[in-house]
Amino acid sequence: MRRALLAGGLMLGIAATAVSIAAAPSIVGKPAPDFVLRGLDGRNLRLSEFRGQVVLVNFWTRSDGNSRQQMPALDRINITSQRAGLVVLGVSVDEDLRRSKEFATAMSVSYPILFDTGTEIGKDYFLQKMPMTILVDRSGVVRYAAVGFRRGDERVYLDHIRELLRE
C-alpha cells in the first residue's frame, strides 16, 4: 500500500512538472517579434526584411557547448537550403560583445551572425536556455521552436524546413 502511495505521489509530481513546463510561455503560433541587430560584418539586419522567406533564427552564447556543436550543423543546412528560400540567422545573446565577436569569427559560418547585448529580444522570444532555435514561416509566424541541441536535431530542423518551404 505504501509503495502504491509513493508511486502515486511520484506520478502526481511528474504530472505537475509536465504541467508547469507546458504552461511556460511559447512563441510558437505567434508573429515573430521584429528586431534590428548589427551583424559581424557591421551591417544592421531586420528580421522583417526576410518576409516571404523561411527563416531559421538560432539564439546562442559562446559559453554553451551545444552552441559550439550546433553552429556547424546549421551552416550545412544554410549551404544546402539557401537556394530554396531559407535564411539562417545566428543571434548571440552574450553580454560580452568583444568575446562574442571573437567566437563568431572563429566559428566561420556562412550565415549572418548578429549581436544582441540587451534583454528585450530575450523577453520577446521567451529565451530561457541556450541554444534556442526557431523557424519562422513566409508570413512571419513562428512555426517551430527547440531548446538545446543534440546530435541529430538538424534532421528534425530539415523536416520542418522542407515542410515550410513547400507551403
Image (tube, rainbow, N blue to C red):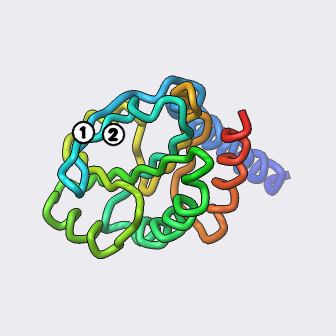
Q: Is residue 2 left or right of residue 140?
A: right
Q: Which quadrant of the figure has residue 156?
A: bottom right
Res 106 quadrant in image: bottom left
Q: Is residue 94 left or right of residue 18?
A: left
- Asked whether, in this view, residue 143 is left or right of residue 51, the answer is right
Q: Where is mark 2, residue-wise? A: 122
Residue 131 x %, y %: 44, 56
- Distance CA(mark 2)–CA(mark 1): 5 Å
118 left or right of 20?
left
Mark 2 element type: helix
Q: Position of residue 159 (x, y in %)?
A: 72, 52
Specify few, some or many for label 1: CA neighbours under 10 Å numbering under 14, 14-19, or 20 or more.
few
What residue does disc 1 label? 119
Q: Amino acid at mark 2?
A: Gly
Q: Position of residue 119 (x, y in %)?
A: 24, 39
**Quarter of the rendering containing residue 41:** bottom left
Locate the C terminus by quadrant: top right
Contact check, label 2 and label 1, Cβ < 8 Å: yes
Q: Give me the disc on residue 8.
A: none
